[in-house]
Amino acid sequence: DIQLTQSPSSLSASVGDRVTISCRASQSVSRYLSWYQQKPGKAPKLLIYDASTLQSGVPSRFTGSGSATDFTLTISSLQPEDFATYYCQQSYSTPLTFGGGTRVEIK
Amino acid sequence: QVQLVESGGGVVQPGGSLRVSCAASGFIFSSYGMHWVRQTPGKGLEWVAFIRYDGSNKYYADSVKGRFTVSRDNSRNTMFLQMSSLRAEDTAVYYCTKDVAPAAPPGDFDHWGQGTLVSVSS
């Protein structure tokens, strides 16, 4: 199984900050990597798929980059509605797997 | 708009069985693969199962293989997850999710239901 390791597991940031979240795969997943945002009590929401393709309706302040084993989600200017938990997920092979999550909190 | 509505969750004893359903609308259900993803309370996400758009291929997480069965009825736009030999560690919110691309291998999840809670406890 492909393991996904996210870092950090949590971070504190202020509105307007640039935030970067890392996801490292235990083996190459090519560009089959997506990012999700989850708020408390809600289902996750797809932000980015194929490493860097922005899902329809997602603000352009979210960008994804990377390939093979190292990927990054960047929020260019953190907004109040962005405080949430973020997960990466690989679809290179089954079983599909998720990272452990990164909680973004208000500083 | 795409809607996915899960139902059938509840409390079941260890070793018991339960079937959860997912009613889909707002897209051509018979063209898309569908998944079940679960989330343990307060914890992370775990992919459970995938069924191809036509039901011809199914994939399972090792943790549920042999105990859970995914199926679909394209005439009713509904997907099912039959769970048997349930264990305490199966306690979770079960989400029905739609794959991003039509007629594709298991991929990403672009729409999610609200989830249904399955609690395995004596």
Image: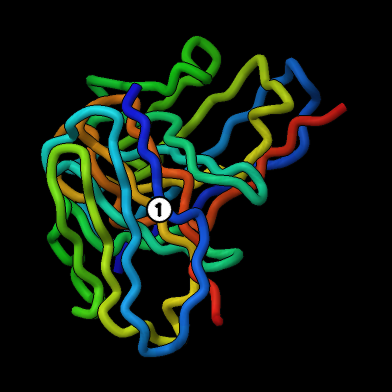
Residue drawn 40% across and 53% down? A87
Based on the displayed image, in which of its 4 quarters is residue B33 positioned?
top left
- x and y percent of residue A96 in the render? 33, 32
> What residue would you read off at disc 1?
A87
Residue A76 vertical position relative to residue B50 in the rendered view, above or below: below
Q: Please, what is the three-letter code of the amino acid marked with disc 1? A: Tyr
Point out the image quarter for the C terminus of chain A. bottom right
Disc 1 secondary structure class: strand
- Taking depth in this image into account, of B29 and A45 the one nearest to the observer is A45
Q: Can residue A63 be seen in this view?
A: yes
Residue drawn 67% across and 21% down? B86
- x and y percent of residue A63 in the render? 20, 68
Q: Is residue B103 visible?
A: no
In this picture, residue B111 sits left or right of residue B85: left
Chain of the residue that carries numbered disc 1 in the rendered image:
A
In this picture, residue B52 sits left or right of residue A82: left
- x and y percent of residue B55 in the render? 27, 26
Residue drawn 31% across and 21% down? B58
The coloring applied to the image is: rainbow
